[in-house]
Image (tube, rainbow, N blue to C red):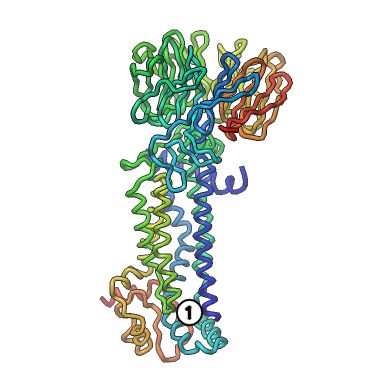
Amino acid sequence: MPLKKGKWRVGRIWLLIVMLLVIGLVGFSCVRGLAPVGWSGGVVSDGTLYVGSKEGRLVAIGLDDNSRHWTEPLKASGQGGGLFGCSPAYGGGCGGGASGVAIYGTPVVMGDRVYIAGYNGKVYSYDYSSLQMDDIYPPEGNLEPIVGGIVIDQGMLYFGASDGMFYALDADNLIWKWEFETGDRIWATPAVSEGTIYIGSFDKKLYALDAADGRKKWEFETEGAIVSEPLVSDGTVYIGSFDRHMYAINAYNGSLKWKYKAENWFWAKPLIYNGTVYAGCLDDKVYALKADTGDKLTEFDMGSPVSSSLVLFDSKVIVASRDGVVHAIDTVENRVKKLAEIEEEIYGPLCIGDGTVYVHTQDLTLHRINATTGAIGTVSLKSGE
Amino acid sequence: MNVWELIIQQPVINVLIVMSHYLGGSFGLAIIALTIIVNLLMLKLTLNQIRSTKAMQDLQPRLAEIQKKYGKDRQKLAQEQMRLYKESGVKPAGCAITMLIQMPVWIALYQSIMLTLAIAPEGLLNLSKYLYSWPILYEALPLSRSFIGLDLAERNFILAILVGATMWLQQKMSMTTSGDSKQAQQSQMMLWMMPMMFTLLALSFPSGLALFWVASSVVRIVMQYRISGWGGIRRGAGQEPDKDKRYVKLISSEEDKSVDDVGADIVITDKQQKPGKMRYLPGQDRAQRRRKK
């Protein structure tokens, strides 16, 4: 039956095309950053590390015995994840198996409470020891996704959201105090110093706001979006921008002190030590710049983009590059060496406590790296394990 | 970066961002413009595919006739079919092969759009590795997601319906008629299955992707119309005689054929014809008819 054979061959080709198309569409979409997964860093307090997991839970890990406690998972904003669970804005991603609300910001411990913000557009406070939820903001409905972390100062809690609004809440009961509107999404974590809040926005501006009432003190415009958390030190705000510049700005009047151009975006919060600013960049390098002039002292090639914030241990700057390598920069000899290597990409900020560097990777694992020897241990963040 | 990313994705992403910048920061316009440009670049392939489909469509009555005539003699049937394909210059798998060639391009375009949309923070972070060192790229990102009241990062029901509708229209226009009930059934299934599937996909993915699908379908509709008019739509609207009558009409006389059927460019007669006259000449017959009118 040559005719039928021919027809069925064409039919099979069509079906093959359809199948390939579906596989291509579904497969590629979920692994290429369409679905939010989260990269919460950890915070150590009284021998316990708190971190937001990919399952959308706040996890408390006893550092002595690796005991773990989980909160109930955060609830998605009510909208489904679409046919394939790949819809973007709800926090219930499909990439990698977990389906919880993504958590990007690092938890904050203040008094007897732990605070965390989710990609579902809500801020939560939990009891420090029991991990029972105390308060939630907003009590009804959801804000736009929250990507940046929260900061708490003088009893006030501050954070920005993807609707471009910057919010101030009473940290005791998560009651709204004031808000400030920027021109675009806020994904950055704010910094607070001497009664002033510093926050960057996608509208390319860095804002200095009065912490008490949200009044704008000044704004500084760069030529690219700002995602990185500002570093405030000695009357200077250090901030990186998508225009590939690291800026040093007078914290009191918003005037430019200096700027340094790299080859790609600055995403990570810089670190200052001994009059030198260490700035990790997505061009695979960490730049060592003189804090007062912006002159480049040296640069360190990490071999992969640096998006996680740096930490300091003794006189060493610990840096994690995307490819899973943790490096230690000797600030005395200006040399870099590989401290440890894990087989997962590193996006989130590093955390240090008691000589151990904690790295949270997107495979629901917390890696404990000895900052001196580089010895690695792991703790699973998967609930029930 | 692997070869695929380096050769295909990276250039497309950078072009999308630059276009978006020069189109007033509108990523929606950039998607539409790039869809049109890619279609123009693949015009020859697309036209070949459409022509191939149309030629196959036009051959169906003759194929049915051959099958009717030589149905019992398989060898003769195969010979006659091959002869017909050869004479009319049609390659049966031509349209499918063309689609297979085009598919990687569409997948690359799709991937690039999704990457450039950078919906999740991970997406934006990953996007940085694809950027050339042109200053304009760094300042343009992240792109604005709003387009004529739509958030390109969110799903949109209306756009999803449009995806299905335009895809159905385009498929219907290019649909071949078949005397074989199995093949007709398969064509009918494809006519509904593809649009429905893409509508469901559009309901699940950001509307930026749905916009790309709608733009692609509209471009294809325009091309299809330029080549074969409304094709299957016109036939579906009752302007096609029923199957049995058509065969009778097509083999009766030249005068009765090709009068009311825009797609009937191949003239089939009982008379012996030179192979050259049997060849499908896209556009020419339609142009002649227009002149007559």
Q: Residues within 10 Å of mark 1 (few under 14, many from 20)?
A: many
**In this rendering, would A375 be left or right of B56?**
right
Task: Tell me if residue A262 can be seen.
Answer: no
| Image spot of residue B224 (x, y percent) | 38, 65
Q: Is residue B270 above or below residue A74?
A: below
Residue drawn 42% across the image and 27% down it: A186
* Disc 1 secondary structure class: helix
Q: Using the rendered view, name the quadrant where residue A299 is placed.
A: top right
Residue that appears at 47% across and 63% down: B44
Q: Residue at x 34, y 89 (%)?
A: B253
Image spot of residue B29 (x, y percent) = 38, 45
The kind of residue on which mark 1 rests is Ser
Along the viewing direction, whichever of A205 and A29 lies nearer the viewer: A29
Q: Quadrant of the C terminus of chain A?
A: top right
- Mark 1 sits on what residue? B88
**In this rendering, position of residue A233 left or right of residue A196:** right
**Percent of width and height locating residue B160:** 36, 51
Q: Nearer the viewer, residue B135 or A193?
A: A193
The chain under label 1 reads B
- Asked if residue B165 shows in the view, the reply is yes
Q: Outermost residue, left direction?
A: B293
Q: Between residues B78 and A170, which one lies in front from this camera angle?
A: A170
Residue at left offset 42%, top offset 91%: B271
